[in-house]
Image (cartoon, rainbow, N blue to C red):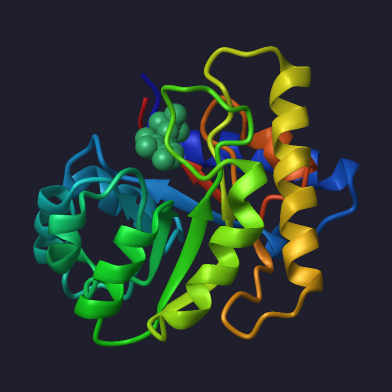
């Protein structure tokens, strides 16, 4: 086990190399520290290295971290599945929501949110049945339907690459998401500027960076 500080340096080194390959600036990517499996003390170690975007995937985890880190200037992301009935517990505590994948959820956000929420539409690019996310075929219609919700701003698309897949499969999935994002961005919807791409985790963030990710969600690599 290495220290969080060493892990940060290693993440930055690898990310830097990937970005350089494709002529991107470090400032074009926001690294989100996924703190769902660690204590607030460990989260603080990452914050001390300069990271200000944090993510949680359960209402209880979010609440605990917010309480313990409440005097720090942080940007909060909610990743992973959210049950409709739990929307009210989280939606007014976060800055970004990464898992918008059904209209029932949009409906509930509309009802509960006190301000406009920056949302990523989660897309299941590889069509695995076990996975949540809108299918690429249904994405256009789904995003059009979101225009009636004044509290939802579609800032971008999010995906999870298939687990333990070969690099080419992962790369193809990320490139596919980017293609979908660009198609939507070109439509210039006022409710869906869709300029952002949330993709890449500990195992595949270098590939995601090469394929245009603007938000990368890293947990394990920071903390193990
Ligand atoms: C846990 C999680 C991550 C971070 O995964 P690591 O492999 O630990 O980096 C990223 N995105 C989502 C949606 C997650 O649930």
**Which residue is found at the position 11% from the left and 59% from the top?**
63
**Residue 4: percent from left, percent from top:** 39, 37
In the image, is residue 23 above or below residue 189? above
Give the quadrant of residue 3. top left
Looking at the image, which is closer to me, 17 or 96? 96
Is residue 111 left or right of 124 when viewed as pictured?
left
Give the image location of residue 99, x and y in percent. 41, 52
In the image, 199: left or right of 85?
right
Quarter of the picture containing the C terminus is: top left
In the rendered view, tell whether residue 29 sits above or below residue 135: below
Q: Is 121 placed above or below 21 here?
A: below
Viewer-side residue, 166 vs 179: 179
Classify residue 47 as left or right of residue 67: right
Rendered residue at 58%/34% (across/down)? 10
Residue drawn at 75 percent across, 29 percent down: 171
Spot occupied by residue 83 in the image (x, y as percentages of width and height)? 21, 49
- Ligand 1 found in image quarter: top left
The answer to whether residue 198 shows anywhere in this view is no
How many labels were placed on the picture?
A: 0
Q: Is residue 176 visible?
A: yes
In the rendered view, tell whether residue 34 sits above or below residue 166: below
Of the 4 image quadrants, the one containing the N terminus is: top left
In the picture, residue 13 is in which quadrant? Answer: top right
In the rendered image, residue 219, in percent from the top left (x then y), is placed at 40, 37
Residue at image location 36% in from the left, 56% down from the top: 54
* Of residues 21 and 207, the one drawn nearer to the viewer in this rendering: 207
């Amino acid at each position: 086990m290495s220290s969080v500080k060493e892990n940060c340096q290693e993440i930055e080194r690898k990310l830097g190399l990937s970005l350089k390959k494709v002529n991107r600036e470090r400032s074009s990517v926001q690294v989100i520290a996924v703190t769902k499996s660690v204590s607030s003390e460990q989260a603080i170690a990452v914050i001390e290295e300069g990271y200000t975007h944090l993510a949680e995937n359960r209402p209880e985890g979010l609440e605990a971290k917010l309480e313990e880190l409440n005097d720090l200037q942080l940007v909060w992301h909610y990743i992973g599945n959210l049950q409709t009935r739990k929307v009210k517990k989280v939606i007014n505590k976060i800055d970004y929501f990464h898992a918008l994948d059904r209209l029932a959820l949009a409906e509930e956000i509309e009802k509960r949110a006190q301000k406009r929420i920056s949302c990523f539409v989660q897309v299941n690019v590889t069509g695995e049945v076990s996975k949540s996310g809108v299918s690429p075929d249904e994405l256009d219609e789904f995003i059009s339907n979101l225009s009636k919700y004044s509290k939802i701003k579609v800032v971008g698309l999010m995906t999870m690459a298939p687990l333990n897949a070969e690099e080419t499969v992962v790369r193809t999935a990320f490139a596919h998401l980017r293609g979908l994002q660009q198609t939507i961005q070109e439509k210039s919807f006022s409710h869906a500027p869709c300029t952002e791409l949330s993709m890449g985790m500990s195992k595949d963030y270098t590939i995601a960076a090469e394929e245009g990710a603007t938000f990368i969600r890293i947990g394990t690599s920071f903390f193990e």
